[in-house]
Image: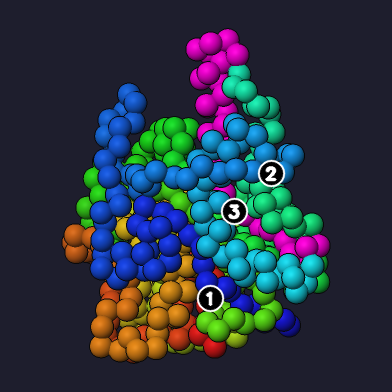
Amino acid sequence: MKKIYLSAPGLICCAGKNKDELYESCIKGSQSGITMQELEGAGTFPVGIITWELPQVKTKAAYTGNSFTESNRIIKLIDIAVEQIRPEIEKAISKYGADKVGVCLGSCDNGSESALTAHKEFLAGGAFPKDYNIRSQSASLPAEYIAQKFGLCGPVMTIATACASGASAIIRGAELIRGGFCEAVIAGGADIVSETVFLGFHALEAVSDSLTNPFSKNRKGINLGEGAAFFLLDTQPEDNGIELLGYGEISDAYHMTAPGHDGAGPAKAMNAALKNAKIDPDQIGYVNLHGTGTSLNDQAEALAIKTVFGDRAVAASSTKPIMGHTLGAAGALETAVCWMILHKKKGLQGIQWMPVHCWDGEKDEQLVFHPSIPGGEPPSICMNNSFAFGGCNVSLILGKV
C-alpha cells in the first residue's frame, strides 16, 4: 500500500496567520484570539474571529472569477492558506501533471455567507449584487476555486461530514492517491462563522457565553471559530517526513446532532485508525482531543478514550479553547497542530512541546478521563480526533518518519 506524506500545512485562524504562530499559541495556551462578538438578538459570546484585515483576492477563472465571489470571506481564508503551500503544489504539478493533482476540501457551511449577503442587498434595494448568481453559494465553489487557481484538472471533491469534514477530506485525498486517481492532492478544510451557523448552534443551546471549558464540571458549550488549513498529500516525503500512518472513519448514525452516550462510535473510529496504522494504543504519544466543551461530547469522548487506552495516562489536550471550534476546518487545523508537534520534535526535550489544555481544572468526577500533559520525551506518533453531527467520527494518526 502506498505511503502518504503530508507537506507542511498552510493555514490561518484566530490563533495564528501560519503554522508557526498557531503552534506558539498552542504551546503557550494563548486564548487572545478569542474575542467577544455580538449576536443580534441573542447577546455577546466569545468567538474565534480573525480580526485583522484580510487581503483582497483576484480570481482569473471564468467560473469563480467575479467581484462577488472575490469578496467572500471563506475564499479569502482559503486563498491565504493555499498560498502558503504554493511551492509544494507547483512542484507536484510540474512532476505529475495538472491532471494528476486533485483537491479535497471539507466544510460545513460554505454557501450561507453568499446567500445572506445577496438576499440582504435584494431586500434592501430590490436587486441582487453585481455578479451574483446561484453558483456563488454552491457548496462546491471553494474547492473549484482552488483547482482553478492552480489550473488543476484532477478530481475535485467537497466533503461535508459536519465538524469532521476537514479530517474526512484528508482521508479522501489519501484514497484518491491509493486508488490511482491522483499522484498528489490538496486536502484540508475551511469554514467561517456566518450568522446562519451562529444562530443554528445557539438554537441547539451549544454555544457558551464564556470561554469554552472542555472536560470541566463547569463546561457550558463551544466557542465558535473560523479558519482554513491545507496540506499537499503525496507519496514522496519532503524533508519533514510526516506520514499519515492510518485513519479510521465511521458513521454510527446515533442521532442527528447528539453523540451516543457510551462513546462507542468514537472508540470504533480510533480503533479503526490504530488497526489501519498497524500500531498499538501504547505507541500513541499525544491525542488532540475533539474536546468541544459540550456536556455530551466530552462525556462520549472520555468514555472512548478510556475504552481505547484503558488506564494509561495518555498525553492529551483540546486546542479548541485556543482557536475556537472551526467546524469544517477543525479536523485539518488540529491535524496541523499534530504535524507541528512531530516536526518540532528534535531538540525540544526539556521544554513545553505539547499544546496546553486550557480549562479551569475543575474535574467532572462523572467523566472517566481527564486531559493531562505528563512529562517525558516528545512523541513520534500523534492521534487527532474529530467527532461530528450524525455520528460522523474520524481519527487520524500521524508519525515522524
Q: Which residue is at the far top?
A: 126
User: Which is more foreground, mark 2 or mark 3?
Assistant: 2
Which residues fall within the magenta stretch?
A: 98-127
Residue at which label 3 appears: 106
Q: CA distance from mark 1 to mark 2?
A: 37 Å
Residue at which label 1 appears: 397
User: Are the residues flagged by discs 3 and 1 in contact, CB closer than 8 Å?
Assistant: no
Which residue: 53% across, 18% down?
121
Which residue: 28% across, 74% down?
372
User: Which is more foreground, mark 1 or mark 2?
Assistant: 2
Q: Residue type at mark 2?
A: Lys
Residue at which label 2 appears: 60
57 shown above or below 292 = above
Q: In the image, residue 201 lies at what x, y percent?
A: 42, 39
Q: CA distance from mark 3 to mark 1?
A: 18 Å
Where disc 2 sits, the SS reads: loop
Between disc 3 and disc 1, whose residue precedes?
A: 3
Where disc 3 sits, the SS reads: strand
Quarter of the image for residue 35 reads top left
User: Which is more foreground, mark 3 or mark 1?
Assistant: 3
Colouring: rainbow
